[in-house]
Amino acid sequence: MAETLGFDDMTEALSVSIFDDGPDRVHIQALYETKAHAEAASATIDPRLEFAISQVPNEDWVRLSQSGLAPVMAGRFAIHGSHDTPPRGLAFPIQVDAGQAFGTGHHGTTQSCLLMLDELETSGAKPGQILDLGTGAGVLAIAAAKLFPEASILATDIDPMAIEVAISNAMSNDVSYESLVADGFEADSLRGRTFDLIIANILAGPLRELAPDIAGAISPDGQAILSGILDEQAQWVADAFRKTGLTVQSRPSLGGWTSLWARP
């Protein structure tokens, strides 16, 4: 149901959240731009299920909900807001304030990617060309820039606001990378390019759709970090990438989310 509310062409939601209300009960909240979009989406709901449509105040809900979050540690990284002092002794503090783009490091998918990047650098890898596909607030692009300062990094997102936020966050963290508004690989500057490392922390459905493009953009000795995948979706996503000829390995679950390594 969350996939239908979030990604149906006619009723695409701005955001979808799933809440566990206790034994045998969950509820889903989907946010739409207009009441008409919400009413159209309601037509996809099983009539046996309860639902309601209501208007929410025009607030910056991302900032309000995330502004008080505590710092997050992931490997050698500490993700913190400007109101926090990063813990001492960690090699890579990253300052990211809550704002109008996804990604403050508090989600299990982002933490898993940070741990995988940390592991990659510790193993001695030195990717020269890196793509952060769906960068959001730019946390993973910043992390890659801190780990691999000699690399050429491209951060892309379908949302122009996210790119603005990612550029601002790069400046706050004294790193730089190329930024680009792009829908997947539908950009002239991406066609034909290959990368030693692709980071794609998005969602299971889009990952499956992009599997051929991602596989085609990995250099012969490169690899991809795939995240934003619920545990029960991991095999579904992995199969799509294996069909492209890639070798796929699953990482341990983190908070109900699974990340994958994919290599030629």
Image (cartoon, grey):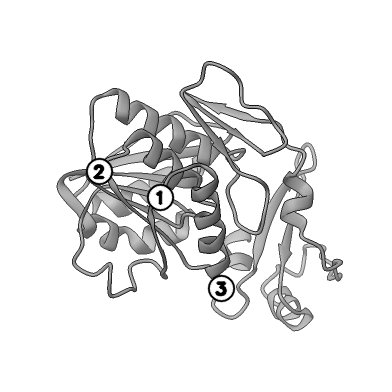
User: Which residue carries the number 3 mark?
Assistant: 8
- The answer to whether the residue labelled 2 contacts the one labelled 1, judged by CB atoms less than 8 Å apart, is no
Where residue 126 sits: x, y (%)?
A: 23, 35
User: Which residue carries the number 1 mark?
Assistant: 176
Instruction: Check disc 1: other Cα within 10 Å, few if <14, some if 14-19, many if 20+.
Output: many
User: Which residue carries the number 2 mark?
Assistant: 223
Residue 233 visible here: no
Instruction: Check disc 3: other Cα within 10 Å, few if <14, some if 14-19, many if 20+.
Output: few
Where residue 172 sits: x, y (%)?
A: 55, 46
Instruction: Check disc 2: other Cα within 10 Å, few if <14, some if 14-19, many if 20+.
Output: many
Q: In front of the other: label 3 or label 2?
A: 2
Of label 3 and label 1, which has the lower sequence position? 3
Q: Is residue 249 left or right of residue 81?
A: left
Where residue 228 sits: x, y (%)?
A: 49, 47
Q: Distance between the residues labelled 3 and 2?
A: 30 Å
Which amino acid does the dot numbered 1 rest on?
Ser
- Give the numbered dot on residue 114: none
Q: In this view, does 120 lie to the left or right of 263?
A: right
